[in-house]
Image (cartoon, rainbow, N blue to C red):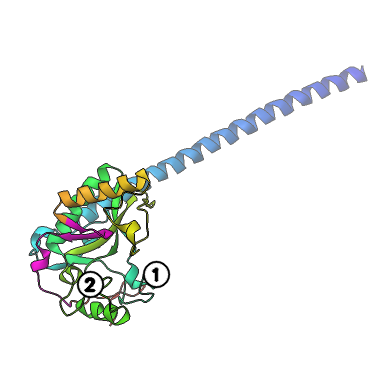
Amino acid sequence: MLALIKNTLKGLGTWILFFVLIFFFSNCRETHNKNEGVVKKETVLEEKEAVEQKEKDIKERPSLEAYADTTFIRLADFSEDFSYDLRYATKNNFLKAKVYPCAECYTRVKTARALIKANEEFKKYGFKIKFFDCYRPNAVQYKMWELVPNPQYVANPVKGSIHNKGGAVDISLVTLSGQEVDMGTDFDFFGKRAYHDNVDLPKEILENRKLLKDIMEKNGFWSIRTEWWHYNLQGSSNEPVANFIWPCKDDSGNQKP
């Protein structure tokens, strides 16, 4: 009889343990689902807020239509769809010297309009413009001339370059996620491999350069034979040489004195 009671209790204990485990895992699953639901809800809300903030920023962004064609503007204030690697604000350039006070891309308004329009076309192909150089103050042109007084590489500052007039840009392409597009050479590579008429290059590189050139020319720019990255806006050579120096900001976003 005792053995029967023991076996009965043992079997009953097993069933109790079984139901306890089922209850425990059911609660765990329910809690997990609830937590997962909260996380998903928070993620959706964050994404919605980000979209709303971006739409608000776009609405509050100043319009180029409010400015005269020849006004100098900071390109990033009018579009966030560009990428930047402004080499002359670093020592990573053929001069091996930093000649800009800080990294900013300014152009005249008419140049900015053409660039934004061209960039919209590049985006249809999954790319966007990356800038190496934009407007260049004439005082910086003098610095560059002192370092490399060779008109083959640096325009004589007395006459000035179209960079000094706010109508020239040095650019490449990156994917929309920021991946580099192979153009065959780095920026400011002075050699035949950088020439537009050099067809002794892999097909992918030639296609990349052609896309860049075709869309830029379609939107009012012209290139020079020896530099795949350099583009001038039509008519910009008629503008006066400028020496406007852009303001620099500290890490807190405040303008430096």
Answer with mark 1 or mark 2, whichever residue precedes in sequence: 1
- Residue 115 as seen in the image, left or right of residue 94: left
**Which residue is more in the foreground, 38 or 60?**
60
Bounds of the magenta segment: 222-243
Q: From the viewer's perspective, is residue 192 above or below residue 250?
A: above
Image location (x, y in percent) of residue 170: 26, 62
Q: Residues within 10 Å of mark 1 (few under 14, many from 20)?
A: few
Identify the residue at image location x=54%, y=37%: 32
- The residue carrying mark 2 is 136
Image location (x, y in percent) of residue 7: 86, 20
Q: From the viewer's perspective, is residue 109 above or below residue 25?
A: below
Q: Is residue 229 magenta?
A: yes
- Residue 88 as seen in the image, left or right of residue 77: right
Is residue 107 among what the camera can see? yes
Q: Name the image quarter holding residue 80.
A: bottom left
**Which residue is more in the foreground, 12 or 133?**
133
- Residue 38 as seen in the image, left or right of residue 113: right
Q: Name the image quarter holding residue 91.
A: bottom left
Quarter holding the C terminus? bottom left
Is residue 49 among what the camera can see? no
Identify the residue at image location x=13%, y=63%: 109
- Residue 246 as seen in the image, left or right of residue 38: left
Q: Is residue 212 magenta?
A: no
**Which residue is more in the foreground, 9 or 104?**
104
Helix, strand or loop for disc 2:
loop
Image location (x, y in percent) of residue 21: 68, 30
**Which residue is more in the foreground, 201 or 214?**
201
Q: From the viewer's perspective, is residue 41 above or below residue 58?
A: above
- The residue carrying mark 1 is 92
